[in-house]
Image (cartoon, rainbow, N blue to C red):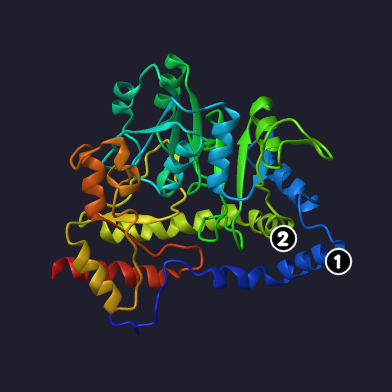
């Protein structure tokens, strides 16, 4: 029996303070060392973090950047995606995915999503490929790995590049391969709310292709090849030493963090399964539950009752990108991508983070169940 009479202490979507507490002394020492060294930009922590990420993913190259958005943008630049080109992606994601496409002058082409995984429906990609299509940005939404074998086969057939948007999927695996290392390049965000989160902005691009690595590495630092020597016009997108040092400490715990998320997800699914649509775990994939996202037509009622019980919830995402005002110039109309629009009306995410106690997860699930019965 789930006890829903628990005191109404606020349960947030994420508790960064709780994650900080066990590692705060390590972080204090790391920050002291940086301050004492006087090296704040592209120093030893950035280089070490890049090497550690490359090792973690068993990949050749990693480049620390200022944000996940920059990782996508500079990766597209490095691949020479430009005005007149088209890039296929999902409309059910954070706007940064499609923003990066527009930054290089290319056109986002949206493909509807699969109802169960909320990732791109691979059966609908091929019909959207044209002679202008140059790449696919695959989003592993909420930490759920996308159908990489099918997408890779299409990319090979049509000579397309694959960029994996792993902003929400650090450590997720597809058929025992870490996502981000399957396509031509993988892009990560270290925004504080992510599974591997910094204490500010940060990002990373990984690849096995030296030409992509070299271009992104130069682009992030004004195209600099030697002091005051610039191969091309670049940008200022550098992961700083402080964030790199913090992320190095957290990287040592990421597998533990992700496993705790999976344990909490199993608790939620065991209680809520059959009452709402829960995230699925396909046998060949290991998700990392950046969010635990359910679907229900009673979303507003459930959210209100959760709020009354001091429990946070968030809708990711209430308006799909194809009908956002910012993308109105693309000409999509309401009803064009029905699965994405349906999901936007029904999804809601409930708290899931490594420090969330089992009892609180059971309490949250119990409140959701009671709300559905009212």
The answer to whether residue 223 is visible is yes
Front residue of 188 and 276: 188
Q: In this view, does 15 lie to the left or right of 6?
A: right
**258 versus 164 height, above or below:** below
Q: How many labels does the image show?
A: 2
Q: Quick one: 18 or 98, which is closer to the camera? A: 98
Instruction: Please tell me which of labels 1 and 2 falls first in the chain.
Output: 1
Image coordinates for residue 5, horizontal then vertical, percent: 28, 82
**Side of 46 where 204 appears, left or right:** left
* Residue at the image point whose x is 38% and y is 46% from the top: 93
Element at badge 1? Answer: helix
| Residue located farthest toward the bottom when viewing the structure as drawn | 7
Viewer-side residue, 370 vs 95? 95
Check disc 1 and report the residue beneath it.
36
Q: Can you tell which mark lies on residue 242? A: 2
Residue 171 horizontal/vertical position (percent): 54, 46
Residue 202: image location, x then y, percent: 61, 53
Q: Where is residue 161 in the image (x, y as percent from the top left)?
A: 50, 25
Measured in 3D between alpha carbons, the distance from the residue under mark 1 to the one under mark 2, in whole angstroms, is 12 Å
For the C terminus, the image quarter is bottom left
Q: Is mark 2 on a helix, strand or loop?
A: helix
Is the residue under label 2 in contact with that under label 1 (CB below 8 Å)? no
Q: Which residue is depicted at the point 57% across and 68% down?
A: 19
Left/right of residue 106 with respect to residue 342 in the rendered view:
right
Q: Residue furthest left?
A: 374
Asked whether the viewer can see residue 181, the reply is no
């Amino acid at each position: 029996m789930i006890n829903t009479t628990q005191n109404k202490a606020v349960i947030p979507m994420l508790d960064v303070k709780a994650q900080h507490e066990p590692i705060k002394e390590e972080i204090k020492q790391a920050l002291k060392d940086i301050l004492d060294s006087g090296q704040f930009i592209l120093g030893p922590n950035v280089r070490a973090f890049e090497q550690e990420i490359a090792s973690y993913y068993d990949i050749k190259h990693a480049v620390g950047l200022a944000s996940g958005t920059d990782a996508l943008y500079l990766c597209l630049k490095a691949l020479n995606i430009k005005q007149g080109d088209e890039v296929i992606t999902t409309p059910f994601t954070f706007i940064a995915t499609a923003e990066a496409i527009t930054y290089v002058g290319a056109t986002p082409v949206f493909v509807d999503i699969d109802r169960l995984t909320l990732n791109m429906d691979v059966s609908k990609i091929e019909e959207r490929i044209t002679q202008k299509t140059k790449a696919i940005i695959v989003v592993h939404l909420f930490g759920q790995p996308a159908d990489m074998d099918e997408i890779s086969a299409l990319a090979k057939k049509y000579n397309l590049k694959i960029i994996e948007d792993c902003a929400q999927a650090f450590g997720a695996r597809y058929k025992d391969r870490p996502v981000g290392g399957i396509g031509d390049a993988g892009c990560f965000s270290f925004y504080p709310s992510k599974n591997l989160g910094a204490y500010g902005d940060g990002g990373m691009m990984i690849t096995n292709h030296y030409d992509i690595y070299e271009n992104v590495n130069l682009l992030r630092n004004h195209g600099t090849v030697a002091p005051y020597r610039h191969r091309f016009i670049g940008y200022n997108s550098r992961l700083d030493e402080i964030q790199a040092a913090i992320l190095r400490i957290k990287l040592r715990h990421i597998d533990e963090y992700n496993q705790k998320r999976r344990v909490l997800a199993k608790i939620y699914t065991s209680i809520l399964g059959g009452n709402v649509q829960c995230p699925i775990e396909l046998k060949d994939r290991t998700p990392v539950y950046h969010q635990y996202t359910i679907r229900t037509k009673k979303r507003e009622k459930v959210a209100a009752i959760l709020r009354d019980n001091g429990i946070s919830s968030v809708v990711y995402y209430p308006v799909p990108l194809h009908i956002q005002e910012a993308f109105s110039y693309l000409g999509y109309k309401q009803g064009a991508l029905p699965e994405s629009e349906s999901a936007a009306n029904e999804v809601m995410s409930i708290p899931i983070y490594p420090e969330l106690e089992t009892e609180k997860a059971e309490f949250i699930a119990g409140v959701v169940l009671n709300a559905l019965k009212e």
